[in-house]
Image (spheres, rainbow, N blue to C red):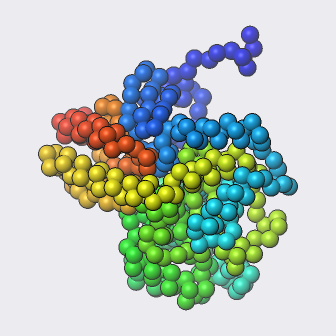
Amino acid sequence: MNQATQHIDVSRNTFDEVMVPVFAPAPFIPVKALGSRVWDSEGREYIDLSGGIAVTAVGHSHAELLQVLHEQGDALWHVSNGFTNQPVLRLAKKLTAATFADKVFFANSGAEANEAALKLARRVGHDRAGAEKHEIISFEQAFHGRTLFTVSVGGQPKYTEGFGPLPGGITHLPYNDIEAARAAISARTCAVIVEPVQGEGGVIPARREFLQALRELCDQHGAVLIFDEVQTGVGRSGALYAYMEYGVTPDILTTAKALGNGFPIGAMLTTDAFAQHFPVGAHGSTYGGNPLGAAIAEKVLDIINLPSVLEGVKRKHARIVAGLARINETYRVFGEVRGLGLLIGAEMSEAFKGRAKEIVTLGAKHGVMLLIAGPSVVRFAPSLLIPEADLDTGLARLEAAVAEFVETPAAAAK
C-alpha cells in the first residue's frame, strides 16, 4: 500500500513532529461539530464560545451551507481570474446593496483584504497628490494581519520582531485619543486604518466621537479612512457591519472571518471614486472570489442579514454580560467586561492579571471553548445563532472552570 492510500494515525504529538511551531494548540483535537457543540477525538463534548475566533458565525455544519457546498462543488470549483463567475457576482451585488460600497475586491483572508486596502490607499495618495502623500496612520495594539505590510501597520511590536527592515511611512497613535489624531494626521497622510473594536488588542470598542473625529480629519486632509471589520463584520456587532452601529462611514472596509463561516474568503469594499485607482493589473489574487467560497459567503449573508438575527446578537450580548456578572459576584476574577454584540472581553481583575490563558485551559477541561485577547482578557465570540440554552450551559461550565481557577496559585499553574 502506498502512502497516498495508507491510513495514518495522528495525535496531538504529531503536531510537534511535523508542523512549523508558530502555534501552540490545545492538547485535544476537535473532530466533529454541530451548531455550537464540538466533540474531540476522545468523544468529549464542548460548548463553543470561541467561534473559531469570530469565524463560525452561523455555527458548525449549518445545513444550508452544506447544501450550497455540495451543489456548487458539483457545478464549478474554480476558474482563473481571466474569467468571472456567477456566485462571485451575486455576492458582490449583495455586499454593495447592503453597504456604502460600489465595488468589491475578493481575497482569501483578512490579512489579504487589509493588504489590498492599504495598497489601494497608497495608490490613491500617489495618484492624487504625489509620492509624498504616503503616510499610514494606525493605532497601538491594533491587529491587521500577518503579512509583512499588515504586521507593520498593526500596533503590536511582538509580531514584527526579527522581520526587519519593515515597510516605512507608518505611524502608530494611542487608540481612542482624538487629540493625538489631530496632531498627527496631515497632508502627508494617505490613510487612517482603524478597528471599530480592537479584537486582538483586548476587545476595546472605539468611542463614537473618536471615529467621527477620524472621519472629519480624513476629509480635511484628503486621506482615506479604512475600517478593518475582519472581526466585527458580518453581524457580530449587532449590525451587519459595525460602522452602521456607529453611524460613521469609511471609504474602504475590509471583511473576512465570518464571511465564509470557515471557508477562506475575504473582501475589500470601497466606492467608485477609490476603486478606479486600481486599474487592470494593479492588484490580484489567484483564488480570490472563487465560485465555491463566493457561493458559501452569499448564503452566510442571507442567513445573517436579517433583523431577527441581528436583534438576537444584542439580546445574547446582554445574556453573556449578565452571566459573567453572576460568576463575578462569587469569584471576583474579572474587572471590566466590554465589547460590542457577540465580541466580548472580560478583563482579569488586578489580583489575576496576566492569567487569562489559565481560564481558557481550565474552560476546555470543563467543556467550554474560549479565547484570549492578550494575557489579561478572556474573549467570547460565539456563533450568532447559538441557542440561549447552549449559552447558559457554556457559562455554567465557565463558572466551574473559574471555581477551580481561584483555587490554583499562579505559580502552580505555570
Foreground pick, 390 / 114 = 390
- Can residue 199 be seen from the camera position used here? no
Find residue 182 and report its horizontal and vertical position in percent.
46, 85
Which quadrant of the view contains residue 65? Answer: top right
Find residue 136 and report its horizontal and vertical position in percent.
58, 74
**Left or right of residue 383: residue 163:** right
**Left or right of residue 311: residue 159:** right
Find residue 292 and report its horizontal and vertical position in percent.
70, 44
**Left or right of residue 240: residue 395:** left
Q: Image quadrant for the N terminus?
A: top right
339 w.r.t. 276: above or below: above
Q: Residue at x 51, y 54 (%)?
A: 304
Which quadrant of the view contains residue 321? Answer: bottom left
Foreground pick, 407 / 7 = 7
**Left or right of residue 403: residue 341:** right
Q: Residue at x 69, y 68 (%)?
A: 103
- Can residue 93 be seen from the camera position used here? yes
